[in-house]
């Protein structure tokens, strides 16, 4: 069984469109994340949710809106897509991390978004 | 600002040992993680150091010196399948991982 799954795997769309990426985890984790990996492989956290509540929101354009219907799902909706949004988007999950806990995040397979 | 520095590329011979260094400057520090990512794949967790010293997991070891803001990943008995990108990442706060830019390791026969 897939631990963290994302759909779609590939997404090709025109500038200005709105699109969504879905993420689900079956690990029983209560924290989920969205990361963006650009063409230079730089992996940057965008959002972090714990028990459906937003706990981290890095400097991300407000065209990006995460939604967590329950703690097993974290979807990412992107409005008015721009060329610079082209990247691979990874969803991840973990237990709630504290200074004493083993820091391990489980990543989904990624969604390659191409904006034309 | 925050920064993690690691070499962009390393090449090593199959069967050899390679060390990938990581120096960091971050606003918070809970621990240092290492992740492996094959081309087209997802990052996968390798190790985590919260305290100074060496952690060993099979052929991979990770070291941390908090006083030097420095860590490294040591890969022994290199295999071709170890060719991948390796990222150090600092846990800067609860649930917040700040990743380095990655080191691309190429293992040659």
Image (cartoon, coloured by chain):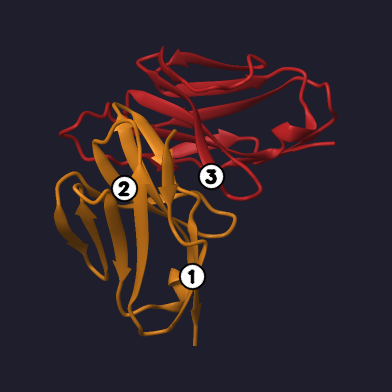
Chain colours: A red, B orange
- The Cα–Cα distance between marks 1 and 3, rounded to whole angstroms, is 18 Å
Residue B15, percent from left and from top: 36, 85
Q: Is residue B45 visible?
A: yes
* Snapshot quadrant of residue A86: top right
Residue that carries the numbered disc 1 in the rendered image: B83
Frontmost of labels 3 and 2 is: 2
Q: Position of residue A52 (x, y in %)?
A: 40, 13
Q: Residue at x 42, y 84 (%)?
A: B14
Q: Quadrant of the C terminus of chain A?
A: top right
Residue B59: image x %, image y %?
A: 27, 71
Q: Is residue B51 above or below residue B18?
A: above
Q: Secondary structure at mark 3?
A: loop
The numbered mark, 1 or 2, whose residue comes first in the sequence reads 2
Q: Are marks 1 and 2 in contact (CB under 8 Å)?
A: no
Q: Quadrant of residue B79?
A: bottom left
**Residue occupying image coordinates x 48% and y 15%:** A68
Secondary structure state at the residue bearing disc 2 = strand
Mark 2: give few (<14), some (14-19) or many (20+) Cα within 10 Å: many
Residue linked to disc 2: B33
**Distance CA(mark 3)–CA(mark 2):** 20 Å
Q: Nearer the viewer, mark 1 or mark 3?
A: 1
The residue sitting at 46% across, 77% down in the picture is B80
Do discs 1 and 3 share a chain?
A: no
């Amino acid at each position: 069984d897939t631990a963290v799954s994302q759909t779609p795997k590939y997404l090709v769309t025109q500038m200005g469109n709105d699109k969504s990426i879905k993420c689900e985890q079956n690990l029983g984790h209560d924290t989920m994340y969205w990361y963006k990996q650009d063409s230079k492989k730089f992996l940057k956290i965008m959002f972090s949710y714990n028990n459906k509540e937003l706990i981290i929101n890095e400097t991300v354009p407000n065209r990006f809106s995460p939604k967590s219907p329950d703690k097993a799902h974290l979807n990412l909706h992107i409005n008015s897509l721009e060329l610079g949004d082209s990247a691979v988007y990874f969803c991840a999950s973990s237990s709630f991390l504290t200074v004493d806990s083993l820091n391990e995040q489980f990543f989904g397979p990624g969604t390659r978004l191409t904006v034309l | 600002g925050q920064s993690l520095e690691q070499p962009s590329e390393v090449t090593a011979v199959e069967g050899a040992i390679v060390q990938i260094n990581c120096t960091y400057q971050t606003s918070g520090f809970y621990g240092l993680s290492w992740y492996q990512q094959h081309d087209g794949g997802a990052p996968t967790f390798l190790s985590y150091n919260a305290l100074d010293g060496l952690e060993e997991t099979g052929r991979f070891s990770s070291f941390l010196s908090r006083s030097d803001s420095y860590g490294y990943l040591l890969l022994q008995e290199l295999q071709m399948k170890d060719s991948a990108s390796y990222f150090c990442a600092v846990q800067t706060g609860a649930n917040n991982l700040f990743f380095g830019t990655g080191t691309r390791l190429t293992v040659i026969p």
